[in-house]
Each structure stands twice: as C-alpha cells, then as structure tokens.
Amino acid sequence: MSDRDARFAEAGRLAQMLVDIARQAMADFAGTVAELGLPVPLARAIVLLSTPAPMRDLAEQLNCDRSYITSLADQLEQRGLVERVTGEDRRIKLLALTSAGRAMRDQISAAVAERNMILLRLSGAERKRLAPLLEKLLHDPSTTDREIP
Amino acid sequence: MSDRDARFAEAGRLAQMLVDIARQAMADFAGTVAELGLPVPLARAIVLLSTPAPMRDLAEQLNCDRSYITSLADQLEQRGLVERVTGEDRRIKLLALTSAGRAMRDQISAAVAERNMILLRLSGAERKRLAPLLEKLLHDPSTTDREIP
DNA sequence: TATTGTTATACTCTATAACTATA
DNA sequence: TATAGTTATAGAGTATAACAATA
C-alpha cells in the first residue's frame, strides 16, 4: 500500500469514528429527551429558544424550511411549551417559551449535561487537547488549502 | 458560575462541535454519493458489502430492522448493484455486489477519500493527536467509571 | 419452536408550492 | 413588490406486525 493509500485509509477510519461518536451522542440525546416525553425536533427547538425568536430565525438555526417551523410551533403550543407572540413588525411571530417550556428547557439541559459523553470519558487534559482539533475541523480553512499529493 | 458549571458548559460546546462536524461529514457524504446517483442508505449498504453478507448482518451493522433491508435490497437489485444469493442455511440470503456494484463501491470509496475533511483540514501530527481521543470516546470505558463531582 | 426474510401498512421528519397578511 | 408565516400535499426513511419458508 502506498503512503498515500495508507493516509487515506487512516483518515477514513478517523472520519468513521467521528461519525460513530456523533451518532452515539445524538442517540443519547434522543434517549434523554424521550424520557421527558419529547421527540427530538421539539427538544432541539426548545433548547434554541433561550430567548424568544422569530420563526424565521429558528428555521435558519435548525437549517430547515419555514413551513416546518410552523408545524413544530403547532406541536409545541399544543403541549403548552411555547406561545406565539406577534412582533413589532406584525408579519413576524416570535416563539417564546412558557413557564412550562422554560422548566422543560432546564430539565433537558441538566439531563444532557449529566450524560455528556465528553465529560464522562475524557479527562480535563484530554478535553484541552481535543478542543483545538475540533475547532480546526469545524472552521473550514477553505477546505482546498491543503494538498493531497 | 461554579467550576462544575464551567466544565459542563465547556463539555457541552465540545459535544456540539463534534455533532456539527459529523453533520458536515454526513452532508459531504450525501453530496458525494448524490453525484453518483445514489441515495445515502443505498450507498451505506454498498460500502458495507465489501464481501457478501446475510441481510440479517446488514441490519445489525446499519442498526435497522430486517424489513428495511428487504426494501434496500430490492432497490439495489433493481439498479443491478447487488444480487441475492441463497446461503447454505437456506433461510439465509446473502447480498453480494455485482460487478457494477463493485465498480460503484470503488467509485464511492475514491470520491469519499478524496474529500475527507480530516485529510483536508488536519496535518499528520494533528491526526496523530486526534486518534487516541476518538478511540477513547468511542470505546465506552463503561461510561459510569468517571465521577462528575 | 425459533429464525430469516417478506409483505402490508403506517408513522416521523421534512420539503415544495401556493396562499394570506403585513410591510 | 417583497417578506413572514400558513396550508395542503407529498416524499424519503424507517418501524411494527403478521406471515411464509426453513431449521
């Protein structure tokens, strides 16, 4: 196997591990919020609503269509977790957590933090080493600036 | 903010980054295989079929129900990428890549390797530092063996 | 009786297009 | 006319339950 192939293979394994770890983390999140009776999309929205936000903004943060936010908002309203608040610009509706919604948000945060895999499995020193690597992976240095000979 | 809270917050950020990076990697994979005309679930199955495997095994590796594998197998067969081969135990059907399937698998592997974010964004030294951290996150040291004071 | 795969069916997540109200 | 949200509808991905064939 050429040097190049070896590097490809090694990087492939790392990428696979990364995806598997994230899958595990997402499954953990799903399990955690399921115990609170929440489907994942509703829980994600609640977590983002630390402060009232226009539905449009939520669509951007969740990376989905505005029409889907309508559906999420309907479900959250039915559960009494958010209310729609008409904005100053009367086209805009803010989603605001109700007190039940805030309580739910606190429960989610606490439960998620407690089971955070990174805290459970890595020491402080290891977390310090991990952070800059993740930063670099996340903040695309334009992707094309490194050569693969 | 207490020390404990600070650690929770920091670990939360790391977990979020990890999930975001994986999402990016998965989107890259989806884009790559879309160029080859494949939906993600079919591509994932093809990648796993380096050697013929019972449908039951595939279900386990893809972490889904056997009935769904039936549906994937139907679609792959229609595209001429796999064939069902009855096993020695005649209840079992192996999925085996056809030559077109093997060609597709090679194409996927090459395209994915070329765009591997880890290769594009991390140096060899950085990859060396990342590997043991991912190993540790992946191979659950029973999750409960570390205390969170 | 237990296991493998199949069928029929249904649910969740999400998008698209056309619409309404406001700006 | 452009933007925010809504409605109706549809598609992908996946599961559940009942079933057939084989062990």
Image (cartoon, coloured by chain):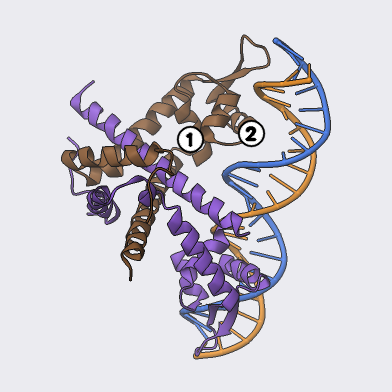
Chain colours: A purple, B brown, C orange, D blue
Q: Which residue is mark 2?
A: B71
Task: Please name the amino acid that badge 2 sits on.
Answer: Ser
Residue at the (25%, 42%) spot, across then down: B130
- Above or below, B67 against A141 in this view is above
Q: Quadrant of residue B105?
A: top left
Q: Give the x, y percent position of residue B50.
A: 44, 22
Q: Give the x, y percent position of residue B113.
A: 31, 35
Asked if marks 1 and 2 touch (Cβ < 8 Å), the reply is no
Separation of marks 1 and 2 at Cα, in angstroms: 14 Å
Residue at the (30%, 54%) spot, across then down: A138
Residue at the (59%, 36%) spot, across then down: B64
Q: Which residue is mark 1?
A: B43
Which of A58 and B78 lies nearest the eye of the viewer? Answer: A58
Which of A101 and D9 lies nearest the eye of the viewer? Answer: A101
- Same chain, marks 1 and 2? yes
Task: Please name the amino acid that badge 1 sits on.
Answer: Ala
Secondary structure found at label 1? helix
